[in-house]
Image: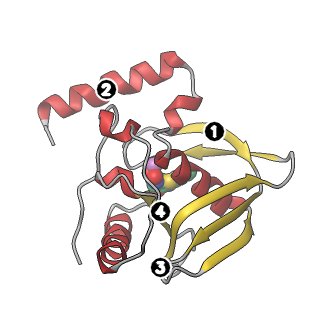
Amino acid sequence: MALLSILEYPDHRLRKKAKPVTHIDAALQQLAQDMLETMYQAPGIGLAAIQVNRPVRLVVLDVSEEKNTPQIFFNPLLTPVDESRNSYDEGCLSVPGFYELVERPARVRVQALNEQAIALDFIADGLLATCIQHEVDHLNGKLFVDYISSLKRERIRKKLEKQHKGHPA
Ligand code: GNR
Ligand code: NI
C-alpha cells in the first residue's frame, strides 16, 4: 500500500479529461487500493484518480458512517433518474479548507465496472449520489468551484496560490 499525493486547485492537471480503462489489470487494482488508503488518511469520502495525477476513469469512495464500506468504480456512467435536486455543502481534497453549497440531481443511475470488472447498475441517492457526481466531474476535468460564482472561485484560487507559494508541492 502507498499514500499518494493529491493535486490542488488551480493545478492544470486537474483539468484533463481522464481516459477510459480498457483492462482492469493488477496495476489498476493496486492504484484503487492506494487511492482508498489515501482517501481514508486524508480523510475524505471519495477520490478520483485524476486527483492523484493518474488521468484514468477510476473513482473510489466510502460514504458509510463507520468507514468500512469501500467502493471502487471503473468507467462510471451517471444518468439522472428524475427531476429531483439536492443541495449539499461540498468540499474537495483538491480545494482544501473551502466548502460551498452545490445543487445536483438527487438520484442518479450508476453504471460502472467494479474492481473485478463485474458490471454494476444501481440507483444512488443521498450522499452517495452527491459524492459520485462530484467524482465523475473530476474525471471530466470539472471541480465543485466551477458551480459557484467567479468572484468566490477567484478568492479561493488566490488563497490557495498564496498557500502554495509558502509550501510548494
Ligand atoms: O471528502 C469529500 N467530501 C465531500 C463532501 C461533499 C461533497 C463531495 C465530497 S467529495 C470529497 C473528497 C473529494 O475531493 N473527492 O473528489
Ligand atoms: Ni473532489
| Cα separation between marks 2 and 4 | 27 Å
Q: Amino acid at mark 1?
A: Val
Q: Residue at x 56, y 73 (%)?
A: 113
The amino acid at mark 3 is Glu
**Image height check: is 2 above or below 165?**
below
Left or right of residue 90: residue 4: left
From the Cβ of disc 1, is ligand 1 less than 8 Å away?
yes
Question: How far is disc 1 from disc 2 in space, using C-alphas?
Answer: 20 Å
Residue 103 found in image quarter: top right
Say what secondary structure mark 1 lies in. Answer: strand
Question: Which residue is at 64% across, 53% downward?
Answer: 130
Say whether disc 1 or disc 4 marks the residue closer to the N-terminus: 4
Depth check, mark 1 against mark 3: the one in front is 3
Q: Which residue is mark 3?
A: 115
Mark 1 to mark 3: distance in Å? 29 Å
Residue identifier under label 2: 159
CB within 8 Å, label 1 to label 3: no
On screen, residue 104 versus residue 92, left or right, reads right
Mark number for residue 102?
1
Residue 85 sits in quarter = top right
Quadrant where the N terminus sits is bottom left
